[in-house]
Amino acid sequence: MKFMHIRHMLLVLVLFFSPLAAAINNLEGYEFIECTFEPRERSSRKHHEGEFTLIDEKDSKYESFTHPHIPVKEGTSQNWSGYAAATSLTSPANNSVDAVYGSWIVPTLASATHNTWCSLWVGIDGYSSSSVEQLGTEHDWVNGQQSNYAWFEMYPNASYQINGFPVNNNDLISASVVYTANGVFVLTIVNQTHKVYTTIPTSRTTSTSAKRSSAEWVLEAPYSGSILPLSHFNVANFSSCFATINNIFGPINDQFWKDDMLTMITSSGAQKAVPTALSNNGENFSVVWHHE
């Protein structure tokens, strides 16, 4: 079993860092850790937002904590800030996205007088479809202190907290969502600082309804019946952001597809979180906090 974990680890890390393979000569020391998965309990009931019907309408005590992109106008969103990539921004091709990869640094939140929430993730779908296959970390200000944890979600199914996976301020996190076949997605998260990783069992990451029409690198104001107050994260830094679209592996702004820079705004147009221009050949960007 240990040998299988090592083989899988090597495959995952090569996928993660194939553009940076020359800088990675020794992958020893990364440890696969077994985690448990705890569904998040809902904190709200029935709600509608735009064209999407939320899982809160179902008779379940568990909630879907994040949400597809809620557009306001071109290049903006009520809940997302970051980048999306697709064959077309108006009519993206289904079954075109096979993988998304990215890294980010766990932000240190500014204090708040009330509870706030913030998710950083990579994923497939949700830009113009009603499902999202996503993996990331959560950074909330709860009862006067910062709370960090890893999670995954196959929206519109419930979110799951990944218990046992370390997430600390300033840690470097990498994540990938990779489609294999027959509706199966492989979700892997790595803590580069602690040199550990885990992969979500595919029994939990299968979707026959996923469109696979877009790739995303997103900082999100989570959703629970409505959009929650956004944590004061100051600046969130994303790096090594790549996707595989139409069998082409490239950075966010690859010439073979389109990308959309998404600014998070309120319904009245006030800026909440603003992404920077892409740097390092389209691999890196930051998101700057403006308002909760």
Image (cartoon, grey):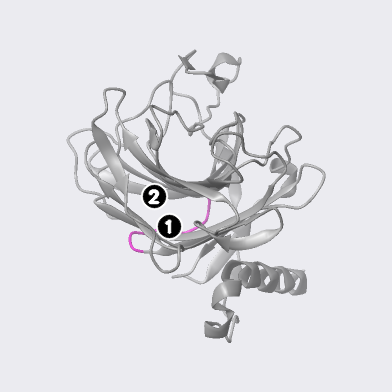
Residue at screen point 56% across, 32% down: 128
Q: Secondary structure at mark 1?
A: loop
- On the rendered image, what quadrant is the C terminus found in? top left
Question: Is residue 64 highlighted in magenta?
Answer: no
Vertical comparison of 261 with 56: above or below: below
Q: Is residue 186 left or right of residue 119?
A: right
The span from disc 2 to disc 1 (Cα, nearest Å) is: 6 Å
Sort mark 1 into few (<14), some (14-19) or many (20+) by Cα contacts within 10 Å. Answer: many
Determine the secondary structure under disc 2.
strand
User: In the rendered structure, which amino acid carries the disc numbered 1?
Assistant: Val
**Residue 19: percent from the left, percent from the top?**
57, 73
Report which quarter residue 141 is drawn in. Answer: top left
Q: Going by the image, does 232 lie left or right of 205?
A: left
220 relative to 43, above or below: below
The residue labelled by disc 1 is 167
Farthest residue, direction right = 182
Figure label count? 2
Residue drawn where x is 54% and y is 59% of the image: 254
Q: Which residue is mark 2?
A: 148
| Span shown in magenta | 163-170
| 130 is higher (above) or lower (below) than 244 | above
- Within 10 Å of disc 2 (Cα), the crowding (few <14, some 14-19, many 20+) is some
Q: Amino acid at mark 2?
A: Asn
> Given contact means CB atoms under 8 Å apart, are the residues at marks 2 and 1 in contact?
yes
Residue at image location 63% in from the left, 62% down from the top: 249
Where in the figure is residue 156, as x and y percent of width and height? 60, 29
Could you tell me residue 162's position as x and y percent? 54, 48
Q: Position of 195 compared to 204: left or right?
A: left
- The tag earlier along the polypeptide, 2 or 1, is 2
- Dominant SS in magenta: loop
Report if residue 167 lies within the magenta region.
yes
